[in-house]
Amino acid sequence: MIKKFIVGIVMSIFITTQVMANYIVIVPQKPGAGTSQWAAIVVKELRKYLDEDIVIRHIPGARDMQGFNKFHNDLREDDTVIMVSHGGNGVSFLQENVDYDYSDYESIGIMNLNIIAGKIKGQDMTQGGIKFAAGSGMIPEGLAMTMLLCGPDKTIDEYVTCFKDNVRWVKGMSGGERRLAFKRGELNATRENPAAYKKHVESNDNAEIWFHHGILQADGSHADDPNHPGFQFEALFEERWGVAPSGKLYDAYKLVKSFRDGMQKAIWVNKGNPNVEALREALRQVATNPESVAAIVAAVGHYEWIIGEDGNAHRDTLMTFITEDALKTLVRFNAEAFGINSVYKEHLVK
């Protein structure tokens, strides 16, 4: 009887270990949020090319920082844990006291995405009166709409005043609340990642695209989005004002949009994780298998993957964008225009 009992315990431990070997993907948002929707699509395809199953664990809170901090502090040493970070995490990395640090991780892959801003169909957004829901990762939209409205050659004080005079920056709305408010016309502008844009804005007969931020290139430039051509911020600015955008606020915008979009949908594991190559290879299959590609394109649009060491290089390039002036301007505009408690992180400046 004792022998059977011991064998039973051993088998139970073995079975439990096998179950625990399944990969856990941490998503720092509630189910249904933009990154959660993207992760569900990608994980469904990734499962096909791994020996283990993958389960998604949502850890929302603190403007989406809680999940990434939890991964960094408590979970990353577990070789079965994978982190999906998003653009809001990139923005917070620049301007808030967070625990996570991208340099501590290995990139499995990054989908080189964009954010698309929509508006009520037919509305002239150059006349001011913008009603927009604030939220995690939306700083680039606020900076872009300020420059589109207010034009070139302004001081930061003038931009802050212009923003306050023309934009109602509505705080406290959840993703579901802001989508419903936009659908009802209570808000006249919105923004989404490509998957959520297709679902919530493109399908809305009373909505149309306003602008987007372009696709980050390896040399640090931004190219037009082939899924939404002709609406890149820089092109719309020059069309309206006759000059290309430039100056301190534009430099701050380039910094924050590059981090937000460059890290928008990124998959990480801890450095030294023995599963790195298996995960990267599975993601390469997702990125090249025609069926998986078709499934993702149908939900998101056609965007390129940056996989493996190229993802690490992508992260390292983003770090070179941080300058003292751009970071200080970002922190100042956050505080004075958006009312965001930002901090200047001197140690990030190279």
Image (cartoon, rainbow, N blue to C red):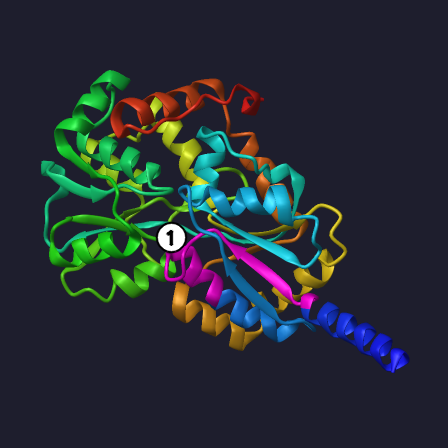
Count of picture labels: 1
From the viewer's perspective, tell me whether residue 22 is left or right of residue 218: right
- In the image, taking residue 297 as reference, residue 106 lies left or right, namely right
Instruction: Give the residue at x 39% y 26%.
Output: 342
* Location of residue 324 in the rendering, given as x and y in whole percent from the top left corner: 48, 18
Q: Is residue 244 visible?
A: yes
Q: Residue at x 40, y 42 (%)?
A: 63
Is residue 22 shown above or below 77?
below
- Residue 239, x across and y down, in percent: 22, 38
- What residue do we see at 24% from left, 19% from top? 154
| Residue 247 can be seen, yes or no | no
The residue under label 1 is: 225
**Which residue is at the front of the view, 347 or 176?**
176
Tell me where residue 311 appears, x and y as whole percent: 61, 48
The answer to whether residue 54 is left or right of residue 195 is: right
Q: 286 or 335, which lies in front? A: 335
Question: What's the residue at 24%, 49% (across, down)?
Answer: 190
Q: Which residues are magenta?
A: 20-40
Where, quadrant-wise, is the C terminus in this rendering? top right
